Image (tube, grey):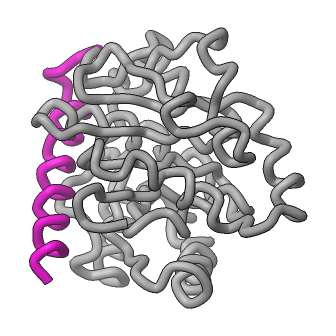
Amino acid sequence: MGRGTRILAVANQKGGVGKTTTTINLGTALAAVKQKVLIIDLDPQGNASTGLGVPHDQRLLNSYQLLMGEAGILDVTRETEIPNLDIVPSAPDLYGAEVELVQATRREYRLREALIACVGAYDYILIDCPPALGFLTVNALTAAQAVLVPLQCEFYALEGISQLIKTIERVRSAFNPGLEIQGIVLTMHDKRNNLSDLVANDVRDYFGDKVYNTVIPRNVRVSEAPSHGRPVLLYDINCPGSRAYLNLAGEVIHRERQMGSR
């Protein structure tokens, strides 16, 4: 795909870890520092589309048509209210893609090939993956150059992540040899809870410098923002969650520059 546009899959097969929240707020933070960003909502639940205020009647052309070859990337891309941030929305018909892709030719490469037409138009493409390791996530990992993994600061955080790592390794060996883990971001950290710190320490011991320094706190403003169809950076720029996502964007850009210099 070239290094001009960096494509990051935001993935974790465990639900409720802050995947979509991280995608839309990291995208907003990157856009705020003049990066041109496209978010691909690849989750049939469509939460990223809702969180960025895309009405349901503007999702008739969505990531399902893109994957099935019924529409091109320009047809399905929508502007958001945020300058420099566009989205390919999702809709429930994307649930059917998991079944339909089983018989499709080049089924793992559908998203990768669809994105070729917009490479160079964006600095970052962020793919919000569903909480599963099926064909939708495999398409995201095959299209991406790197994976960003949100990991909740809770007791079962490390359970299941080994399966995600195995999937990343399989996709790397079979479809996408350049795929790497960009980083792991700790989410929903509660500073009042000792368990959050214990989990964070365990994750850092296990993954080392793959873990971002930035930790996303458990913050009521972050939780409220999606119901208003806005990222938390627009809903309340001064809250701890907003500051954390701005810091995370700085770390992502720094790591990408390091990767680009290799």
Q: In this image, 233 relative to 43: left or right?
A: left
Image coordinates of residue 103 in percent, x first then y, are 89, 64
**Residue 253 percent coordinates (x, y):** 15, 56
The foreground one among 155 and 20 is 20
Q: Position of residue 180 (x, y in %)?
A: 38, 77
Left or right of 61, for residue 162: left
Looking at the image, which is closer to me, 200 or 117? 117
At horizontal 39% and vertical 61% (from top left) the residue drawn is 148
Residue at x 12%, y 35% (from the top left corner): 34
The N terminus lies in quadrant: bottom left
Compared to residue 205, the image places residue 10 above or below, namely: above
Give the residue at the far bottom of this rendering: 173
Q: Quadrant of residue 199?
A: bottom left
Q: Nearer the viewer, residue 152 or 63?
A: 63
Q: Residue at x 63, y 77 (%)?
A: 163
Lateral position of residue 9 relative to residue 161, left or right? left
Q: Between residue 165 and residue 128, name the one nearer to us.
A: 128
Q: Is residue 106 magenta?
A: no
Does the stretch in magenta take in 236?
yes
Residue 168 seen in the current view: yes
Total residue callouts:
0
Residue drawn at x 64%, y 42% as measured from the top left: 66
> What segment is highlighted magenta in the picture?
235-262
Q: Taken as a whole, is the magenta stretch helix, strand or loop?
A: helix
The spot of residue 198 in percent (x, y) is 35, 67
**Quarter-wise, where is residue 164 in the image?**
bottom right
Residue 191 visible in the displayed image: no
Quadrant location, the C terminus: bottom left
